[in-house]
Amino acid sequence: MGGLMGSLEIALQSLLAQQGALEVTSNNIANANTPGYSRQTPVFEEEPPIVDGSLVFGQGVSLQQVQSIRDNVLNLQLNQATGTQSQLDSFLGGMNQVATIFNETQGAGLQNVISQFYNSFQQLSANPTDVTLRQAVLTAGQNLATAFNQTSASLGQIRTSLDQSVVQGVSQVNQLTSQIAALNPQIAAAQAAGQSTGSLVDQRNQLISQLSGLVDTSITDAGNGNVTVSTADGTPLVVGNQSFALTTQLDTKTGTQHVFSQGTDITDSIQSGELGGLIQARDQGVAQAQTNLDNLAAGLISSTNTQHAKGFDLSGVAGGNFFAPFTPGAGGSNAGAAAQFAMAITDPSKIAASSDGTAGSNGNALAMANLQSAVVVNGQDANDFYSNLVAGIGNQVSTATAQQTAAGLVVRQLQNQRDNISGVNLDEEAANLQVYQNAYNAAAQVVAAINTLTQTTINMATGA
C-alpha cells in the first residue's frame, strides 16, 4: 500500500528480479560447454505483504538467491568411477609397453633366439669338428645373451618412465590440493555472507574431479562451506585452508620412487587414480615380468653350464662354463641375471661337443640340444616357461582392457546422469529467456503506466 509510489516500487523490484533472472540464464547459456559447470536457477520470493485492516496488499517479488543444481552423491560416485578408469588407463599404458617387448607375433620376444640356440647344437652334432658350425653355436649363444640383455634393459626403461610419471603425478596432486585449500575459505566466507557460492563450488568440484583422476580420494563436507579431502585410507590432503603436500623419495632397495605423506610411506595404499595404476604397473606388472625374465635367464645359464661341463672340447679338455656363471643374490634372488647374461667362451674349439674326449664324438652336443625339452626353471623347460611368461602378460592386458571398457561405460553413464541434472539444456534456457523477458517487459509497462498516471496527477494538481 502506498499509492502510485508503492506500485512503482513493486514494478521496480520486479524489473530488478527479472533482470537478475535474465543474467542467470545468460550465464547458463554462456557456460553450456564449460566442464564441471552446474546449471543455475533463480529463486524468486514473494515480498511480505502489508495488512491494512481486512485488506492485504502484496509488495512484489525479489530474487532471493541463485541456486546451483547439483547432486553431491552423484558427484562422489562419478569421482570414484573416474579414479577407477584413470587407474586402468595408466596401468594399461605401462603393460601395453611390456607386451610390446614380448610380442612374438610381430617378431619381438625371445622364443626364436631360444630355439635357434638349441638348434645350433643339434646342427653341430651332425659334424662336431666343423669350425663353421662351432662358430654358429657361439653366435647363437651371443644372440641369446644379447636378447636377454636388451629385454631386461627395455623393462628397465619402462620402469624408469613409470617412475618419472609417479613423480609428476605427485606434483600434480600437490598443485590441485593447494588450489582446493585456497577455495575453501572463499566459499566459507561467501556462504557466511549469504552470497551465491555456485561458481566457486563448481571450480572446487572440478579440481576434486581432477584430483580423483590422480589418486583415490575421500571427501567430507565440514558443513561450513569447507570440505576435507583425504586419500581412501585416511591420509589427509586438504583440511580447511591447509593442504598437505605429498613427496617422493627413492627407495634404495627397489630403485624406485615411493610416495610419502608427512614422513609416512603410503605407496602401497594408493590403489586408484592415475598414480595407483602407475604404481601397480611399475611394482607389479613390470616387476613380475623382470623377475620371470631373470629366473629364465638364471635357469638357462645354469643348465647350459652344467651340461657343457660334462663334455670335452676339440682338444679333449673337459668343458668349462659356456655362459658367464651367475650367482643368485640374497634369499636366492635371480635379480640381474638377464642383464648380466654373457658368453664365457669365444673360441669355437672350446665348445664341449664330445662326450668321451674324442674329436668326432657328438654325445654332449646332442645332450645340449636336448636341453630344449629338459626342466630348466620351476619344473618347466625354457620354451614352456617363456610361453607362460608371455601368456601371463597377455592375460593381465586382456583383463585390464575388459575392466577399462566396463569402467568407461560406468563413467559415461554417470556423466550422462550428471548432465541430465546439472547440465545446461539450451532449449530450456531459451524458453526461460522468453519467460523472463516477457516478465521484464510487463514490469516495464507498469512503470510506464505509473509514470503516465503520475504525470497526470501532477498536471491536475498544478492545473496544467
Image: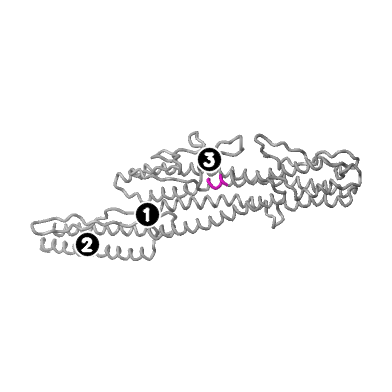
Q: Amino acid at mark 1?
A: Asp
Distance from disc 1 to disc 2, alpha carbons, whole Å, reads 40 Å
Residue placed furthest toward the left:
53
Left or right of 421, for residue 88: right
Q: Tell me the SS state at disc 1.
A: loop
Left or right of 188, for residue 106: right
* Residue 343 appearing in the image: yes
Q: Is residue 231 magenta?
A: no
Q: Badge 1 is on which residue?
A: 71
Given contact means CB atoms under 8 Å apart, are the residues at marks 3 and 1 in contact? Answer: no
Q: Tell me the SS state at disc 3.
A: helix
Given contact means CB atoms under 8 Å apart, are the residues at marks 3 and 2 in contact? Answer: no
Magenta residues span: 275-280
Q: How is the image coloured?
A: one colour
In percent of the image, x 29 and y 45: which residue is there?
A: 193
The secondary structure that most of the magenta stretch takes on is helix
* Residue 152 appearing in the image: no
Crowd band around label 3 with a 10 angstrom C-alpha radius: few (<14), some (14–19), many (20+):
some
- Pinpoint residue 447: horizontal percent, then vertical percent: 22, 62
